[in-house]
Amino acid sequence: MAKARKPKLAVWKFSSCDGCQLSLLDCEDELLAVAGSVDIAYFLEATRAELPGPYDVSLVEGSITTPHDAERIHKVRRQSKVLITIGACATTGGIQALRNFKDVDAFIGAVYAHPDFIDTLAKSTAIRDHVHVDFELSGCPINKEQLLEVLNAHLNGRKPNVPAHSQCIECKRAGTVCVMVSRGEPCLGPVTQAGCGNLCPACGRGCFGCYGPKETPNTTSLAAWLANTQGLSQRQVRHQFRGITAGADAFRKESEAHD
Amino acid sequence: MSAKQKSESAARVVPADGLDALIRALARAGYTTIGPRVEDGAVTYRPVGSAADLPLDMVDEQGGGTYRLRASKGAGYFAHVVGPHSWKRYLYPPRQLMWRASRARSGFAVEAPEPAADKLAFIGVRACELRAMEIQDRVFDNGQFTDPGYRARRAAALVVAVNCGRAGDTCFCVSAGGGPRVEDGYDILLTEFPGKDHTFLVQAGSARGARVVKALRGGRDAGEADLRAAQRRTDAAAKAMGRELAGDAPQVLRENLEHPHWQRVAERCLNCANCTMVCPTCFCSTVEDVTALDGSHAERWRTWDSCFTTDFSYIHGGAIRRGGAARYRQWITHKLASWHEQFGTSGCTGCGRCITWCPVGIDITEEVRALAARGGRK
Ligand code: SF4
Ligand code: SF4
Ligand code: SF4
Ligand code: SF4
């Protein structure tokens, strides 16, 4: 039975670097299959053609940082049957959420010649804080395999294989030697969601937490270990948790506990 | 006495370079030789082409949440103990294809891959690791249930065991019941005598092992004195165990299922699952279905899973074990207590991996002790 019409896909950008949208373009071979399975109705990074809504699936990249963003995301939601957020910005507020811990007006004054032209919110927030989100795909940037998996699962009516467990499980399945245990390298892997494909530990680096908190993250215990056993200062512990996903609740609370 | 005669007839003492000859002989016999190598600061199990690939004169210092290698002149090839890898990686790989299905004219054509059983030779298998294999045999090939892939890989694998001459700081095979002396289950058994007169006692434990041992050149047939010297090596390791498991661990756990101490463990436990991933007997897995975008093709994969994740205990309505207290209790009581009822043995070999590779150093032997003390049992 041929389907009456292909699902309409839209890709939206808010405050972000475009890296996650690029992951979709980076799918290359698979992109053709995606393009064959959906009508790409709105995707400015890839095409100027714009089809009017409503859309079956909206991928949303970026965080909400301006009053205009805060309004526009509601328009996107209204036009979308399924809304999937992609990347650390959309799911946690992103690296720009570092400003949430400071006075944003002071930054604007220091950076811009005409601060009065700048219309921005005090905080950078996740899409979930503004509208209902059907699925969140984390990462900075997202893993293109995971993006394909999410689209694929949606198109085939099944649950995506995007586990919420720790980065450590990725390390161990891959056979990567733990950098915490073998070198005393601070690593956020035990509290960070898997998905990157084990990038940093496999290169001998601790995990930066790009994928945000895993399910049931025990940040307090990890922070205590980093401080008491690995000798990190309060400031260093704070910086561990205040990175790309600083705005994620569990990481925000842990970094604030070390202010 | 005939068994002894048999082992003596295929027992030889060879100079240290006999190890290299052994590895090469196995390769010539068509085996892919896997053994200990230094990789990223730890001894892991990877393909080895010659004795030069092995961690000569390297000793591991292990503790709760810490592992460091250090050079130790004259220590020999097997002075390290067990590292983050176990042979489970090869006998029960982290990711296995179970079947694939393609859309046919009517319905689906399902195809399950034949269990591939590459001829692997495991070099440097410790007593605790042989025990782990026996424990996993009871899970995957127990007369009632058989995992064909596991069985094929296990049957094809040739085991070159090694007696431990040194115990690690997190080892407790003696109190866990088995080790550090290799008793059986091997094709070839090595005992290393490091030092100036660096030699190996090489014993055969099977016909295919004996063929390899007999073909080794140089050295001499082993005698009683050599076997006694080997015994002294493992006796020394047995006396130097880094940890000890309380003998009444199963009872302590059974009697303390509701105990405030579980909450104290939960305060430290990260639910990261490292302990279960490194444990050579943990066998839990999950299945993932992947589909082609157009729905023409599907595959089912089995991957290592852990009782420390939320999804693991997910049933209709939510996860049963929502936090660290319930998950740690599940793990340790299964491993040390209910495993007995289920498989007729403990699930723990005393290898110490879960202690060393826990990022926050949670120690299975300590937790049992703490429960016993706080629970009023001595
Ligand atoms: S390197 Fe980091 S992510 Fe990997 S096992 Fe160790 S603590 Fe976990
Ligand atoms: S637990 Fe025992 S058999 Fe295993 S490595 Fe340590 S001493 Fe050897
Ligand atoms: S429970 Fe720990 S000590 Fe026992 S076999 Fe597993 S990893 Fe080794
Ligand atoms: S006991 Fe240690 S290794 Fe196991 S889940 Fe808890 S923190 Fe992770």
Image: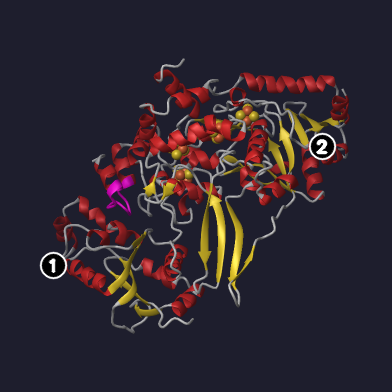
Question: Badge 1: how crowded within 10 Å, few (<14), some, or many (20+)?
Answer: few
Secondary structure of the residue carrying numbered label 1: loop
Residue at x 49%, y 41% (from the top left corner)? B274
Whether residue B29 is visible to the viewer of this picture, yes or no, is yes
Residue at x 37%, y 70% (from the top left corner)? A21
Question: Which residue is farthest top?
Answer: B378
| B276, above or below B296, in the image | above
- On the rendered structure, is A126 left or right of B255? left
- On the rendered structure, is B74 left or right of A223? right
Quadrant where the C terminus of chain A lies? top left
Q: Does the stretch in magenta take in A240?
A: no
Q: Position of residue B208 (x, y in %)?
A: 83, 41
| B331, above or below A105, in the image | above
Point out the frontmost of discs 2 and 1. 2
Q: Does the stretch in magenta take in A246?
A: yes
At label 2, which amino acid type do we have? Ser
Residue A114's tag is 1
The answer for which chain carries disc 2 is: B
| B288, above or below B25, in the image | below
Residue beneath label 2, please?
Answer: B206
Q: Which residues are magenta?
A: A241-251
Question: Badge 2: how crowded within 10 Å, few (<14), some, or many (20+)?
Answer: some
